[in-house]
Amino acid sequence: MRNNVGPAMARSDRHRVSLGLAPLCGALIALTATVNVAWADADSARNAGAAWLIKQQLGDGSWATTSGDLAVQATASSLMALRNAGQAKSPSYAAGTTWLANADADSVDAIARKIEALSYAGRATVAQSEATRLYGLQATDATAVWGGYGAVNTTDYVDTALGLTAIRVGDASFASKAYNFGATGNPVSNAVCNLVGNRITVATGKQAWPMSSTATGQSAGQGRPSVVATALLTTELRALQRNSALSSGSFSCSSVNYTLSDLLTPAVAWLLDQQNADGGFGEQRTDGSKGSSNVLVSALVLKALTAQATVSQPQTDNTRNWLLGKQSSTTGSWDADPLVTATVVSALPAAAGAQLADADHDGITDNVETQLGSNKAVADARSQMGAPTLSISGATASAFTAGATVGSPFSYSLGSSGNYALASGSLPPGLQVNATSGQISGTPTQAGSYSFEYQSSSGGDTVVGRIDVAAPADSGDVPLPGWALLTLGASLMGALKRRFQSPA
């Protein structure tokens, strides 16, 4: 399963373009969509966007851009968006996580996004493996920065922002990398010193970063400021500022002492200067003028502004309102593109409180079900998923389906290998598994369909299962429809592929 990014991207791992933002920004910044009727509020907009993303998920669990590429980036972004929208218990989220865990990520931005999404999804083992690989791709020794197009000692600041985020959330050794922040040889503070040295001073108290470090023959600060790079770095620097691993916020670069606030304050000031009269943001033009407001760029800036200790107003609200006005009033998407829509949904306030209500406990919240047009009283989340197209030849593993009834005792054996651990999904509420014996037992308390994957550390077995729990009025096994068999098959194929790819 490869992250196919088209013939123009057919290069080695370190020669792939950054983030998907580089090719996307050039095309997307030129877009000027007609303003739609704004959704009533950010909650409604987020729910509509999440519903649209669920509908766009492909049968194998992935997402892709409108042009059909950047699957890893689009899937990772969609998972982060669904999580922000309160859909982390949905079958769509589980299927996307399984696909991403098995997907090949060939560029720095794809690897970084994969790490972040899987870390938040609880796939620590895969995330750590990818984080170790990512750290080995750094552009400069003992410095957590990454270069675009494989250039040595040249920093790509979009990749660097994403890479710092990835190792912060997905690398279990990040605390040791960040320990004694500011000391000589510390890779995190070395990265921040790189940012200090490559800032562009636009005016007094206003600084920004370029897309990449200066070319040969240029001195630091001679590049062109980038709204995208500055927004991403500002978001991550604020996260570093909040991280408990950084026991001290001060550091020294070339014998000059700094704090992270010394970088954040002028960067935010410069970003605010780039806001257009309509409230949106665009990437700066080659002549230094402001670019036309663009959805993707505006969403990245909104996320940066809302992350700060002091949120700048009214600029932040103006940006959010501009984005709400750009949402399609008929589909709920932005630019009809999963990557763009996911970026906006992730920048909006996270679902909380009543927004997380899920009456039928099928993993899709009630408000999102309303947008989908599904029944909030029926556990029908899997009906939103398409038929998968995965197949793996020459591989076998065990899979089962079973029916249960609310209030009636249930028992099933996963097998005799023992030492079973949950790899993905969840059992129905009221059921537990004895990790030693592999026996599932208990009394279901909630109707619905529950898929899961267990792996045995003793025999190496993988068991993919699905239990359909019927309401008390129903008796016997619940028949499994054709689309559900396909869904179960996809889960089995994903488990097998992961097993085959895992080192012995």
Image (cartoon, rainbow, N blue to C red):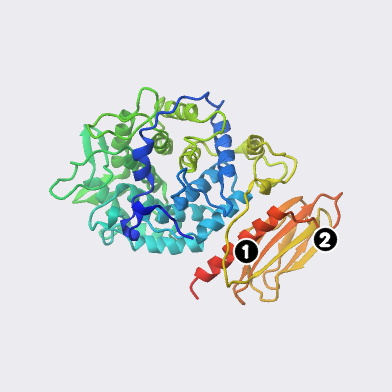
* Residue depicted at 59% across the width and 54% down the height: 95
Tell me which amino acid carries mark 1: Leu
Crowd class of label 1 (few under 14; some 14 to 19; many from 20; radius 10 Å): many
* 427 sits to left or right of 245: right
Q: Quadrant of residue 377?
A: top right
Q: Nearer the viewer, mark 2 or mark 1?
A: 1
* Residue depicted at 34% across the width and 39% down the height: 26
Tell me which amino acid carries mark 2: Pro
Q: Position of residue 287 (x, y in %)?
A: 22, 32
Q: Position of residue 473 (x, y in %)?
A: 87, 49
**Residue 415 in sight:** yes
Among numbered discs 2 and 1, the one appearing first in the sequence: 2
* 35 sits to left or right of 493: left
Q: Position of residue 73 (x, y in %)?
A: 44, 50
* 412 sits to left or right of 472: left
Q: Which residue is mark 1?
A: 492
Q: Quadrant of residue 424?
A: bottom right
Viewer-proximal residue, 168 or 488?
A: 488
Q: Secondary structure at mark 2?
A: loop
Numbered circle sitting on residue 409 = 2
User: What is the CA distance from the residue labelled 2 to the residue labelled 1?
Assistant: 26 Å
* 389 sits to left or right of 482: left
